[in-house]
Amino acid sequence: MGYPARWDRLREEMAREGVELLALVPGANLFYLTGLHFHRMERPIVALLPREGEPALILPAFEVEKAQRAPIPWRLFPYTDTEGPASAFHTAAAALGGRGRPIAVEALGMRVLEWSLLAHVFSLSEPIASEPLLARLRMVKGPEEIAAIRRAIAAAEEALQRWLPEVRPGMTEREATRRLIQACFAAGADALAFEPIVVAGPNAALPHATPSDRPVGPGELMIVDFGAVVDGYASDLTRTFVLGEPDPEAARIYAVVREANAAGRAAVRPGIPAEAVDQAARAVIEDAGYGPYFPHRTGHGLGLEVHEPPYLVAGDTTPLQTGMVFTVEPGIYLSGKGGIRIEDVVVVTENGGESLTAFPRELRSI
């Protein structure tokens, strides 16, 4: 889907929500609608998108040439470092209808810096969250987006294959992480999707642990959670390995998590609520007696961001649609002992769900 079509859909959603003006800051939503990537910095950049008429972009003067390359008929309101942004915000607000006009903003992305400037020039009291509107634009991926996610997954899977022969007992988690990062770029990643999680033993009992200087030991479970970015789109892959031979309990728990992962993937089909995938995976773990040790949702949407709607969790009744892409990542974590998580990326198809990840799910000894 090209940018004009995305803008048409944006305006349809704005009309549906009764939103007249949308404010975006640098990030995934602005990139989705314009192809522009700006750094977030102390110099504010805000795109103001009216439901009718030309959009406006407030930005530092040295970013004007970049903005002019976008396929958007911007009205640009630049400012210099000497001037500061206040005057540009006032001028843009006047051009778009002035004070008292309600604005929908990115509640999860806009900083106090941008909001305070907008609130002043538009006389705003409370922000209107634009996330539901924007989620409807981006949840269903087009063929070109799914192709980019496939490339990001291929880079991650190749990186994992390159990395595994380098891991050995006695290596620290931090050193193992550094080598995985190198493998990602060697495999063709443009960037990392997030800071990799490579943790073993007791640290693997923490779902979002930070790699440390702790050496990994024989017989320990090692969780490896990472992703690559290719052409703007992210992958997210988790596998759990064992250094040497697993003890009987670890092997038993691994089998439960693997079955839960399979049940979650098998449940995917158009029309069911997102929470149904969580229910399918969670039931396996609960039936095995490990329900209290699965503390997080089963998955999350994936695309320009690593975490985006829909969310596979109780309470998310979003109907799955063909083209939605999300993770399925059940886990079991035993405090002081270790943890296991198996994560795949799934796309909803007309007939069910296709796992875009193909890396083996058997418990592998390294």
Image (spheres, grey):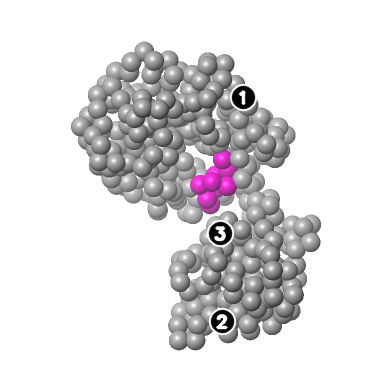
Prevailing secondary structure class for the magenta stretch in the rendered image: loop
Q: How crowded is mark 1: few (under 14 residues within 10 Å), some or many (20 or more)?
A: many
Residue 298 percent across, percent down from the top left: 56, 33
Tell me the CA gap for discs 2 and 1.
52 Å
Q: Give the range drawn in magenta.
A: 300-308
Horizontal side, residue 270 vs residue 149: left or right = right
Amino acid of disc 2: Ala
Q: Where residue 110 appears, x then y in whole percent?
A: 57, 63
Q: Do the residues labelled 1 and 3 touch (CB within 8 Å)?
A: no
What kind of residue is marked 3? Gly
Which label lies toward us, 1 or 3? 3
User: Where's residue 165, x and y in %?
Assistant: 26, 32
Q: Mark 2 points at which residue?
A: 86
Q: Residues within 10 Å of mark 3 (few under 14, many from 20)?
A: some
- Quarter of the image for residue 265 reads top right
Instruction: Give 192 or 71, whichever is nearer the viewer.
Output: 192
Q: Nearer the viewer, residue 272 or 337?
A: 337
Q: Give whichever of discs 3 and 2 has the lower sequence position.
A: 2
Measured in 3D between alpha carbons, the distance from the residue under mark 1 to the one under mark 3, in whole angstroms, is: 32 Å
The residue indicated by pointer 3 is: 109
In the picture of the structure, the residue carrying the numbered disc 1 is: 280
